[in-house]
Amino acid sequence: MYPQYYTSLIYYYQVINCVIIIKKYSKGAIKLNFCTLFSGSSGNCVYIQDGNVRFLVDAGKNMKAVASALQSLDTRLEDINGIFITHEHSDHISALGVIAKRYNMPIFGRRATLEAVCDKINDIMPDRLTVLDGDGTFDIFGIGVTPFKTPHDTPDSSGYVFTGSSEKTLAIATDLGVATDEVFHHLCKADFAIVESNHDIEMLKNGPYPWYLKNRVISDHGHLSNDACADLVCRLTEHGVLHFLLAHLSANNNTEKLALNTTCCKLLEKGIKPGETTVNLAPRSNISTIFDF
């Protein structure tokens, strides 16, 4: 029932009155592992490790929060080999300036994104920045890194696919208003996908946000709703992607239960039985489950 590569860490969900119960079974770690340190509008950061190579994707909140989260993983900021930036919004780069001053690590991203980072963080040293220009996969410390464009209200917002030394792949796509063909093309090749499940549409419509902000969130350059995320997950399962982490949940316009139920109930409607795929949540302020595959 489970892909052979995923025998070390198995999740399955059960739907009981549309309440999702997630159970974990672990038989030991393999090569590539990752977790979110925190996820949401207050700050975003993903930790990825492959052997002795350690990356961060984004660096939101502040340096103290990032360092504290890494310490709980027995890792230090000075152990990080590089930071990949998805885009320049503050919830993704607010810790970057202080980290860049204190630690000598490269910062990777698309040209327009890094230019915007320099505009926001005036004293960041340009020699810390490495532009990922063009299409294709970059070999960075022995890890394959493939950036791809995501539709968001920044000049060149990106998602990433990381291919570890074991050839297993992790794809990350958050902060996107719609799952374009390009996004889907990259996600459907992944073994594990971190995808956005930002808001419940009714909660957003009836919530406290002003209309201009509501319109921004629901636009094609805003954020992915629970329903859109569920549709994307179902499409991806048809292409062999079976493991998902739902991320960037809104504090005001979503709940963990709504996000999880929307995707898992949609999977059941499509005839995908419990145990055939795995779905988990990225907490807003805490470290997620550490996934090994």
Image (cartoon, grey):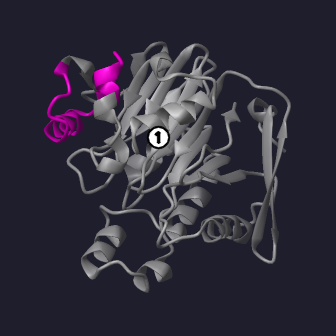
Vertical side of 107 occupied by 244: above or below = below
> Residue 96 location, x and y as percent?
32, 34
* Residue at 25% from the left image edge and 20% from the top image edge: 128
Q: Which residues are magenta?
A: 99-126
Question: What's the residue at 64%, 19% (across, down)?
Answer: 166
- Classify mark 1: helix, strand or loop: strand
The reply, left or right, for residue 190 in relation to residue 113 is: right
Locate residue 47, reporting x and y percent: 53, 33
Give the labeled residue for mark 1: 45
- Pick the front one: 142 or 238: 142
Residue 256, image quadrant = bottom right
- Along the viewing direction, whichever of 251 and 190 lies nearer the viewer: 251
Give left or right: position of 144 versus 279.
Answer: left
* Quarter containing the C terminus: top right
**Magenta stretch containing residue 30, yes or no?**
no
Q: Residues within 10 Å of mark 1 (few under 14, many from 20)?
A: many
Q: List x then y, in percent, for residue 61.
A: 40, 45
Asked whether the viewer can see residue 103, the reply is: yes
Based on the picture, tell me whether residue 102 belongs to the magenta stretch: yes
Q: Residue 193: image x %, image y %?
A: 57, 44
